[in-house]
């Protein structure tokens, strides 16, 4: 098999096109307002505004529970709102801080705003009223007991 530099350059060009298309298709990387950006904001509704991050999420399923772990860096527990439904978990958080520092001949102002929002579909129906949460070091863990008919047993016979 012969190596052809032209084919290799063409392959690299296609890969770079794919990477840039993926990178710039996310609204947070677009420069300036555009009609596509405004349409996206309208479609996402009130809870999911442009500039809102999605927390990183891990989802685990055990025989009895579904466990959701979500990262909210820089957010206090009181600033997180969790809504559990039979088939999904909605998480949102927002914090706004202002800083003002004045010294002789020097004045500084700063603002910080963090928003997170995500709806996480669940792999099995759960019992929302029995959800338990823990929060430590910016990591929220939600333990959701499955509805009884959806408990899995490791002793099931295989044909």
Image (cartoon, rainbow, N blue to C red):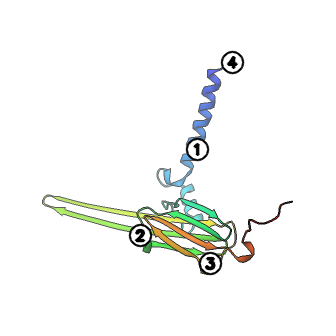
Front: mark 2 or 1: 2
Q: Are marks 2 and 4 in contact (CB under 8 Å)?
A: no
Residue 38: image location, x then y, percent = 54, 60
**The one of 81 and 101 positioned closer to us in this rendering:** 81
The residue wearing badge 1 is: 21
Front: mark 1 or 3: 3
Q: Earlier in the sequence, mark 4 or mark 1?
A: 4
- Graded by Cα atoms within 10 Å as few (under 14), some (14 to 19) or many (20 or more), the crowding at tag 2 reads some
SS class of the residue under badge 2?
loop
Quadrant of the rendering where the N terminus is positioned: top right
Name, please, the residue furthest toward the right: 159
Name, please, the residue furthest toward the front: 155
Report the Cα–Cα distance between label 4 and label 1.
31 Å
In the image, what residue occupies the spot 52% across and 63% down? 70
Front: mark 3 or 4: 3
Q: Which mark is residue 128?
A: 3
Is residue 46 in sight in this rendering?
Answer: no
Residue 145: image location, x then y, percent = 64, 74
Residue 6: image location, x then y, percent = 63, 22
Quarter of the view holding residue 96: bottom left
In the image, what residue occupies the spot 41% across and 69% down? 76
The residue wearing badge 4 is: 2
Q: Which mark is residue 76?
A: 2
Q: Earlier in the sequence, mark 3 or mark 4?
A: 4
Q: Are marks 3 and 4 in contact (CB under 8 Å)?
A: no
Report the Cα–Cα distance between label 2 and label 1.
35 Å
16 horizontally vs 109: left or right: right
Q: Are marks 1 and 3 in contact (CB under 8 Å)?
A: no
Q: Earlier in the sequence, mark 2 or mark 1?
A: 1
In the image, what residue occupies the spot 49% across and 55% down? 33
Q: Are marks 4 and 1 in contact (CB under 8 Å)?
A: no
């Amino acid at each position: 098999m012969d190596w052809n530099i032209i084919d290799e350059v063409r392959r690299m060009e296609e890969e770079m096109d794919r990477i840039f298309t993926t990178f710039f298709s996310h609204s947070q990387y677009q420069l300036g307002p555009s009609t596509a950006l405004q349409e996206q904001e309208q479609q996402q509704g009130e809870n999911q505004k442009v500039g809102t991050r999605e927390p990183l999420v891990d989802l685990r399923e055990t025989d009895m529970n579904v466990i959701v772990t979500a990262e909210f860096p820089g957010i206090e527990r009181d600033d997180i709102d969790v809504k559990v439904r039979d088939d999904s978990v909605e998480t949102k958080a927002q914090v706004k801080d202002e800083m003002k520092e004045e010294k002789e001949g020097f004045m500084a102002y700063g603002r910080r705003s963090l928003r997170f929002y995500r709806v996480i579909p669940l792999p099995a129906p759960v019992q929302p009223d029995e959800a338990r949460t823990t929060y430590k070091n910016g990591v929220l863990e939600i333990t959701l007991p499955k509805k009884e008919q959806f408990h899995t047993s490791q002793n099931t016979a295989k044909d």
